[in-house]
Structure formats: structure tokens, C-alpha cells
Image: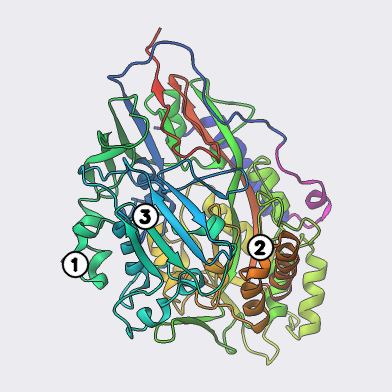
Amino acid sequence: MKRYPRFLLLILTVIVALVVAGCSSTDTAKKSKKVDTKFPLTTKVEGEADPDAVLNVALVSDTPFQGILNPNFYSGAPDSNVLSFFYPSLFSIDEDFNITNDGGASVDYSDDHRTITVKLHDDLNWSTGEPVTADDYLFSFEVIGNKDYDGVRYDEIFENIEGMTAYHEGKADKISGLRVVDKKTAEIKYTQANPAVKTGLWSYAMQRSAYKDIPVSKMSASDPVRKTPVGYGQYKIDSMVTGESVKFSPNEHYFGKKAQVAGVTLSVASPDTINEGLKQGKIDIALGYPSTQYDPKHEIDTVTFLGKEDLAYSYLGFKLGKFDQKKGENVMDPKAKMADVKLRQAMAYAMNNAEVGEKIYLGLRWPANSMIIPSFKSFHDANIKGYPYDPKKANQILDEAGYEQKEGEAYRRTPDGKELVIQMAAMTGDKQSEPLNDFYIQNWKDIGIEVKLTDGRPMEFNSFYDRVQKDDKAIDIYMGAWSTGTDMNPSELYGRKASFNYPRYTSEANDRLMADGQSEAAFDHDYRKKVYDEWQQLMMDDVPVAPTLYRYSVSPVNKRVNGYTIETTAYNRYEDVQIIKDK
């Protein structure tokens, strides 16, 4: 099947124009802004619902999903989309992403905010029929805190729990700050009050009985994670071809509203053929739909497009060190190729993100100025300039820092006269990915910096993050993206002990601000805002990561689907989904 032809022609024409022209002027950058389109958030279709119909869902990806189907262990968006059908968060949230008491569990805070009581819904059950217990919820903490845990969730928030450090270091058998009050009630005590728990409290239980004979070191590869996962969501897994497809049926033990369709079939679909499948009516919902496939001038008449500002941003990451497994923390290497902050700043100024957002993504993406996204309205600092496209300034920085470009040579050398070649890791994707990489590489060539793709080609999704996370020495920089989730607190991504801190950036100033932003004083909104304003500026000054683009996410939904929502406050986006009979 072919991709939507007129859209393909438009995008390829734009990319060729970008690469050839080099976009040397800053005028387009100043004019660029996000699209001014108002998308609906929920589908509304009149008619009689068909309870025997099956919902056909496409997981749009150019690579198989990993099939790590437990919240403690997964790390990629494709697995997250699969989990959303059968393993949801326990907590509902409001428009400011604070936990409310309308989901699978409620929370209560002590006056000093150091003790949290979590009460599970009386009817919250695993799809096997067994009740989800307070012990199951606390078991999730025990696994993440275990010294043999091989996932990426353990961070400063977990470490703040009383007794967690001793347990994590193998000096204690139990975590003293965790207590089962009764079958459905758990208590968590923290050493210090932290406002992050209002949005970032761990929100998943883990069925202890399913893992009782499995060592923590082997859990991520075990059958309950990879082959026979069990959740407590609206659906349950009937069958799965790992990486390719999943068939779900309604979970008769779900505590909330019962499913209004007979089942769900989820299959991986190529970004290059997704529009054709939507046009033919073969797909009801497309998860992970690439914005590069959306053309506002040629919308697909079989679908309704939902859309909103995404809780995500794209970025250029600079590898500055490694993760020390023994210490459990990130360690910077002063001899790293990207250790010079001036080199990082120059590369950030050389990227024409405004042109990319306007021409490649048709306004659905726009230049980013901070790692705290605009959706966090109270904390995003719109006054920070970030790194707008300015090749003249980039050249000036490099000249002053001693990166000389000798006469007759195409590229600059290091201040000590050595050849400078920077290896970049990039992911495969749709057909725009490679030309887009070429465009950025040309941006850097325009200021005399030589950048080559690691291994000479883009990497598929799983390999990319595996190599970046393991600090592959063949990677100096990488093009990545973060889904921030609903927790504004950046410590999980940039803290000294955060596994997700892929640049491996650390500094005393960063440590101080991370601590201040999670302190008892930070329950005062103005104080916390002041802390994170300073942190946003620090990250722009030190630039371990150069944010490139914010984004709109668009979700195509077949016009026979009623009640599907992407509302942030929706506890279950599939709860009211119906398939309307063909008139």
C-alpha cells in the first residue's frame, strides 16, 4: 500500500528544499509558531451501538513493540500504549495533574505531608478475579527498590521513603516506611516532605502471587511480564504475538464501567501505510500517529482527528559521562568529546528548529525553549530564550573557544588541533526521519562541525535506547524525545541518581535545585516556581540537553467510534468507547 500521495509529495518537496537551501536566515525562525487549529478532545457520534463489534487499534511504529508489559519495567511508548488497555494507573488526575480520588485508589496526606495513605477501591481486582491488595501495591515499591532491580524507575523520590536506602543497599530485609494497614489500605512514610508526590506518587500495583518464586533480577524477562501479564484494567489479554499484535477481551472483574465493545484487536502498523489503512476504514484508532502524516489541507474523510498539546518534547542529548552501577549514580567524564559547554551551545544555536516545525511538521511542532513544557502552565518559563536559530552566534562561540577551521579544510578542529568528528545516534521512523537527520547534519556543517551517524545509519527504536542507556562509546550525541507524563518534577530525568539521565549530567547547582524543588518549603507554590525558574535557566546555560521542539499530538479515530477521548483528566480513555452500527 502507498502512503497518501499528495502529502508525501508535499513533505519530500519541503525536505529537499530545506536541505538544499540550508535555511541560513533567522527570519523564518522568528515567524514560526504552532498551528492555530482547534481539535476536539472526544469523539461524538449519534446512532445505535453495536455490542458485538471489535475495536481495531493500530499501534503506529516502524519497529515491533518490546512486549515488556509491566509498569515497573517497560521504558518505551509502544509498550505503554499496550499497557493502557489492561494495566492503568491507580490514580485519576485533575487539570493540573494532581492526584484525585476518582480512580482505582484514593490518597490522603498527613498534615506534615510526610505520610501518605493509599486506599484501594473495594472492587479493584486483577483480571484473574483476585483482589488487588495493599500488599500488591507495596510489593511494587519493594521490587523497584531492590538492589537487583534492572529497570529504570528507582530515583530520588523512591529513595526518600523511610528505610529505602538501607533496603536498596542490601542492609535491610524490609522497607521501614511501608506498612499494610489493612487488605485495601497502604501507608507510605517519607523522610522529607516532597510536593512531587501530589503528581508523581508511584501509581501501579504488582501482583505478588504471580512473582513469588521469581528473583527480582529475572523478573523483567519472566513470563508474567513477557508472556502472561495480568492487570486490573477494563480489558484483559486473550492472546499475543509479541511485538506484533494483541487481542483483548472485556475484563469481567473490572471495578469500573464495563466495556461496550466485544473486544479489541491491536496490531503494529507502519507509519508509511497508516493513512491508507485509515482511508479504507480498517483502523478505528491509531495510537502513536506521526504528526508528519497529518495534512490539514487534505484530511482523511473516514476519520475525526482529535488533538492537544502533547506532554512531550524532542531534544538533542550530549553524552557527558556514564552511569556508575556500583554507586548507582551518573558520573561525568571531563574528557568526553562533548564536555566543552561552548561546543554544546554552538551546536544548539545551529539547529533551525523553527523551520523544521513549520515546514516539516506543518506547525504541529514549534521551537522549545525549556525542559519544562508549556502544559505545566504554572512552572514553564516562557521568558527563557533557549537556543533560537543563530548560526552567526554559533560561529562566534566556536571561534572564541578555539575551534579553528583552517584554510582549505571543510571542518573545524578541536582547540588542541585534533580532528573533530561527532558521532550521532538517531532512530529510524517514517520516511522523513533520514532527510531530517541530514538537515540537522547540514546545519552543523554550515558552522564547520562534522557530524556522522553512528554506524552510518539510523537505529531501530529498541536498539537506539538500549545503546544510549548503556552509554555506548560510539555515541557522542543523540536525537531523542521524552514523554514527561503528568509529573512536572524533572528529577527522574535529570537527577544525579536517575537512570533516565542519559546525558549523565551532574552538577552541585543541579543537585541543590533538585533538592529544593522537592523540599517541604516547595509546598509553597511561589517558592517552588522560583526554584524551577532557576533550574530551567541552569539547564540552558549548561546545555546537557538542547530542547528542540514542543508538539501537538493528533489522533485519528474512525467516524464509527463514539466516546473515545484524549482528555487529560479522563481516568480511562476507553471507558465510554462504542462502535456505532453502520446506517
Question: Does residue 366 appear in the picture of this structure?
Answer: yes
Q: Residue at x 65, y 61 (%)?
A: 371
Q: Which residue is mark 3?
A: 185
The first of marks 1 and 2 along the sequence is 1
User: Mark 1 or mark 2: which is in front?
Assistant: 2
Q: Residue at x 34, y 58 (%)?
A: 137
Q: Reply above or below: 410 against 239.
A: below
User: Mark 3 or mark 2: which is in front?
Assistant: 3
Mark 1 element type: loop
Could you tell me how far apart the alpha carbons at marks 1 and 3 are, in whole angstroms? 25 Å
The one of 66 and 529 positioned closer to us in this rendering: 529
Instruction: Report the magenta residues as a range.
Output: 23-35
Dots 1, 2 in contact, CB < 8 A: no
Q: Which residue is mark 1?
A: 214
The kind of secondary structure the magenta stretch mainly shows is loop
Mark 2 element type: helix
Q: Amino acid at mark 3?
A: Thr
